[in-house]
């Protein structure tokens, strides 16, 4: 049945295009769906299972690698294409094969378990309930169901695990410095959505300092750790807290940071004796399997 909202129909067309690719033999192609920080756009990364985390079957390990990106903010210019405004799902699938051959070819092969899950997901999505693996949630979602735009209790089981990241009973596939115990009051801030290898110091700071759903416990934190892939990428000393979007940013847009009820901090790189203790160190084991809340209090 045709959904009455054209924005939902366009998102469904993208999901259906992936289904078409599954039928063509690219069953190892996955989706990594999320909501924008402002909560106004649904986003979907399309990537091979080798780039999907083992501990969460709908989260990408590295959104900058082997991933094609769609946002509902693109409207019917799918993936930024100006020649796809009137395309159906099969047309979009054909363009994905032609224009992103490295991504699509990496997904060639069978994955019947995921294709079965995907068919169930499409049935739920066609009711207007789009899948969401990551968002700036007010509370941690459970691990029984994959959330949708309708809420946490979606009735949609979690997808089968991917092949990237921590392996069961072993170490992460990417080895960094040894794990470290934290003695100071700290906020661990996972910046998976905004982190990019080689990003500037300013962009890293601005990705870390806002904007977050936090309670009064934030006032007890002295330091904030920028965390990506369970490794501390930078350590900041928190100087003050402000309502989200009330202090200037150089690398992020006003739409991205102006969020009612959220918070951002201003600060500076931590003193050397603190920074050197934690920078580059592993935080493996800090989060339970599948945990998606980006902020964690330690000693606060």
Image: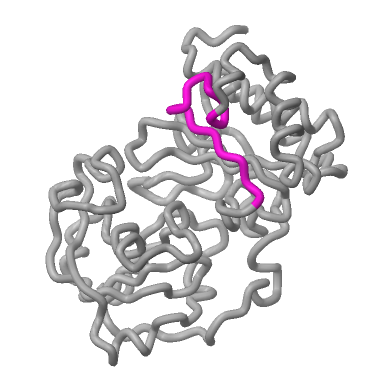
Give the answer, above or below, for where 252 lies relative to 195.
above
Q: Is residue 160 magenta?
A: no
> For the point 48% across and 21% down, which residue is it?
75
Q: Position of residue 33 (x, y in %)?
A: 55, 39
Give coordinates of residue 221: x percent, y percent. 22, 72
177 to the left or right of 88: left
In the displayed structure, would residue 245 be above or below residue 153? below
Residue placed most toward the observer, 55 or 268: 268
Q: Position of residue 136 (x, y in %)?
A: 37, 47
Within the image, what quadrant is residue 45 found in? top right
In what quadrant of the picture does the N terminus appear? Answer: top right
The residue located at (59%, 52%) in the rendering is 60
Please check the rendered image and state whether residue 78 is part of the magenta-colored stretch, yes or no: yes
Which quadrant is the C terminus positioned in? bottom left
Task: Identify which residue is drawn at 61% across, 35% down.
Answer: 156
Count of marks, rendered view? 0
Camera-side residue: 149 or 278?
A: 278
Residue 85 picture quarter: top right
Q: Position of residue 249 (x, y in %)?
A: 22, 52
61 in relation to 254, above or below: below
Q: Nearer the viewer, residue 5 or 125?
A: 5
- Which one is in front, 70 or 39? 70
Tell me: 88 left or right of 290.
Answer: right
Residue 186 horizontal side relative to residue 96, left or right: left
The region drawn magenta spans 66-80
Colouring scheme applied when the structure was drawn: one colour
């Amino acid at each position: 049945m045709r959904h009455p909202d054209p924005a939902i129909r366009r998102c469904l067309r993208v999901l259906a295009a992936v289904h078409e690719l599954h039928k063509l033999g690219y069953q190892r192609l996955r989706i990594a769906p999320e909501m924008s920080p402002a909560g106004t756009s649904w986003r979907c990364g399309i990537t091979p299972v080798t780039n999907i985390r083992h501990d969460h079957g709908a989260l990408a390990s590295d959104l900058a690698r082997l991933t094609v990106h769609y946002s509902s903010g693109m409207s019917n210019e799918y993936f930024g294409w100006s020649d796809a405004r009137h395309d159906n799902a099969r047309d979009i699938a054909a363009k994905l094969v032609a224009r992103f051959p490295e991504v699509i070819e990496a997904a060639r092969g069978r994955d019947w378990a995921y294709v079965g899950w995907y068919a169930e997901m499409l049935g739920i999505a066609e009711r207007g309930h789009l899948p969401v693996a990551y968002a700036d949630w007010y509370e941690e979602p459970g691990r029984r169901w994959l959330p949708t735009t309708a809420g946490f209790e979606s009735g949609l089981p979690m997808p089968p695990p991917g092949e990237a990241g921590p392996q069961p009973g072993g170490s992460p596939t990417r080895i960094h410095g040894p794990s470290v115990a934290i003695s100071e009051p700290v906020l661990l801030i996972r910046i998976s959505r905004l982190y990019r290898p080689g990003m500037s110091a300013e962009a890293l700071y601005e990705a870390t300092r806002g904007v977050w759903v936090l309670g009064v416990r934030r006032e007890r934190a002295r330091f904030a750790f920028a965390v990506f892939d369970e490794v501390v990428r930078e350590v900041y000393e928190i100087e003050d807290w402000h309502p989200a979007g009330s202090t200037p940013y150089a690398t992020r847009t006003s739409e991205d940071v102006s969020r009612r009820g959220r918070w951002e901090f201003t600060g500076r790189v931590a003193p050397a004796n603190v920074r050197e203790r934690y920078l580059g160190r592993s935080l493996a084991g800090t989060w339970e399997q599948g945990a998606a809340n980006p902020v964690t209090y330690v000693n606060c």
